[in-house]
Amino acid sequence: MVARSLALRTALALALPLGGLGDRAQAAEPDAELPSPEQMSEAQARALFEAAAAAHQGQQYELAVQMGAMALEALILKVGWQDKATQASAVVVIDSLRKLGRTDEADALFAMAREKMGIPATAMPPGKQKLLASMEAFEQGRLDAAYELARDGVAMVERDQPDDTELPMYRTVLAQLHVQRQEFAQAEHLLRENLTRAEAGGDAATIAAAKNGLGSLAYSRGDYDESKRIYQEALAGANAAGAGKEAQQAHAGLGQVAFERGYTDEAILEFKARLDIAEHDFGGDERLIGALGDLGEVYENVGRFDDARPLLEREAAIFAKTYGEASPLRAGTMSRLGRLYRSMGAYDLAIDVWKRLLAIQESKLPPDSPTIGATLNNYAETLWAAGREPALLISMATRAAELNERHLVQQVSYGSEAQKRAALEAFVSGTDRVISYNVHYAPRDASATRLGVNTVLRRKGRVLDAVSGAQQALRGRLDEATRAQLDTLRERRGQVATLMVRGPAKGEGADTYRAKITQAQREVDRLERTLGDSNAVPEDLAPVELERVKAQIPEDAALLEIASYRRFDARYKRFDKAFGETHYVAYVVRRTGEPTMIPLGPAKPIDDAVAALRNALSDPKYRDVNTIAQRLDRLTMTKIRPALKNVEHVLVSPDGALNLIPFAALA
């Protein structure tokens, strides 16, 4: 069974282009008017195979057997057993038969296929067993285990089967896992080995593919000049060889580099060229999805809405037809379209998109999925821009904040430094939105104020978690057995976070997806209970809650939270213009009662006053420190003091430049 599972995955990976498994089963129902295998053209047979593969991915095994058997018979007649589509058709039918319990038929077809394909009846080599286990670990969200198994598997295949034709693919997979871990040197070593082998073989398309891999690596590393140079080399080679797939990848890479550097006109040209090739090669099928979306998104970003709309609407329609109207995989294309409508000011259309997407996600995904949080944020932002339903807006934003906080806890507790930074950057951007809404649109709304102060508390707490090294210090105090349990907890938290972010795999049922998460979460809960008994789980990794903070404030004291934020304009036309100048806000929190929000205004006058006060304090000859301190006091504490009546002790938590001054000097 192990060998057959790897054969299925490998054959499908090699036979289909990236992203090519769509739900085309609906386009070729078994009772539709289809020619017999003898009458089918090669193109019809290949299309039928892809529909069978899609039915298999969608767990429609009866349909996969019927269509796959017809495709297999036709492909044997047209191109023979050595064609990858023929081989993949066989494994689709074999695996579908096994899923249906028809093992005798599956065994008979497997034996025939093995004979025709020249596969000896031997056990899978140990290296490929490791690689299969790595694939399974990756699908389960266990990234550390996937990396370790892939690393060992590639080393074993290189040692035992150095001429294996699938080895470049295995190296590329391992390189991608290295990139996720920010291990760029190791990834480059693997990808350069692919290039060396490709150049020795002399096939121009293979060389271009290897160079595209190196171009992508340079982009991930932030070396845009090098990335552009390599992609241009890959494009030249692909064009000379007439290799459309590799040329598309090179144009896409060049477009990403140009867009990242702010060269939007250049990015548009590259993405257009990519789309032109895809249109020529694929017509209107799902392999156009990325090409349409990337170009449409650039148009939307620069405000060319009339150019963006037909592209993004077409992409969304193809995706829905391919994967089904109710597929949670539609989140990416629907979100692109919803954001476009919001930027256009077509709020009714945008709200309809968010409503439909939220309904899909809530029916298919776990209730605490961060992708639901992203949709809630988009929905709330659209209501804000439209000036509608403030109560619903706050409800959605509050729920989204809870989901984002849980996800951030997982990222901070298990992620690499790069993953932590990326999560925190996204969190800070969301914080700016929440505070902007409270300060500038709903200053008297108690729910908005509670959400604002809770968001500030969470932001500061998670930044501290990410940079303090608290977990490393904790590990040093534990015995070996408890450290092993803590490492397992870290991995399982990572598994839950990865599965939630990634969503269900193509064709994976909602129940199967939920079961994976439930199993991992149960293990997290068990380990947290076990480690909690020994105080080995740090409390600072628990979600931050306003009520917990209030309970720690003495009766005669108040917490003064000062935060900096970029003012956000919800009615932006271009996202790069959405965030304005930095402002300060203060929140006063007491043990009882509602928190109070005090706007402090733009940051520049305050920061200038801080700089002047610090210069005065550092110069022993300066005689007029009080005047400068009073200017800063007028900009800050004079506005705050009315909210501090009857408070004996103020617990100050400043932000930005205000971290640099002694607040006692302003008393």
Image (tube, helix red, strand yellow):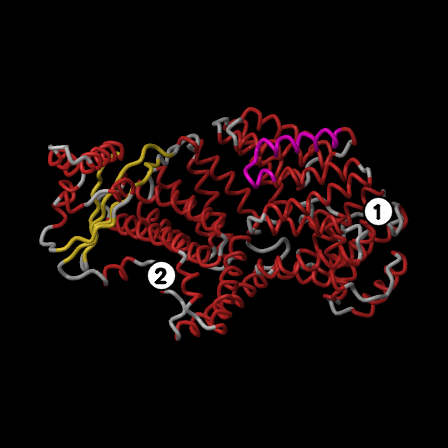
Instruction: Identify the residue position indicated by label 1 in the image.
Output: 35
| Residue 185 image point, x, y percent | 61, 46
| Residue 5 image point, x, y percent | 73, 62
At x 64%, y 46%, the residue is 322
Q: Quadrant of the N terminus?
A: bottom right
| Towards the viewer: 190 or 303 | 190
Residue type pointed to by label 1: Pro
Residue type pointed to by label 2: Asp
Q: In the drawing, what numbered circle is on residue 540?
A: 2
Q: Residues within 10 Å of mark 2 (few under 14, many from 20)?
A: few
| Residue 663 image point, x, y percent | 18, 45
Vertical side of 5 occupied by 643: above or below = above
**Which numbered mark, 1 or 2, is in the foreground of this view?**
2
Q: Is residue 539 left or right of residue 19?
A: left
Per the image, label 1 sits on a secondary structure element best described as: loop
Q: Is residue 133 left or right of residue 640?
A: right
Give the CA distance from mark 1 to mark 2: 65 Å
| Towards the viewer: 465 or 431 | 465
Vertical side of 91 occupied by 477: above or below = below
Vertical side of 342 occupied by 87: above or below = below
| Residue 587 image point, x, y percent | 23, 48
| Magenta-colored span | 218-239
Q: Quick one: which residue is furthest to the left in this view?
A: 646
Residue 594 lies within the magenta run: no
Majority secondary structure in the magenta region = helix
At x 64%, y 49%, the residue is 175
Q: Quadrant of the C terminus?
A: top left
User: Which quadrant of the figure has residue 287?
Assistant: top right
At x 36%, y 49%, the residue is 397
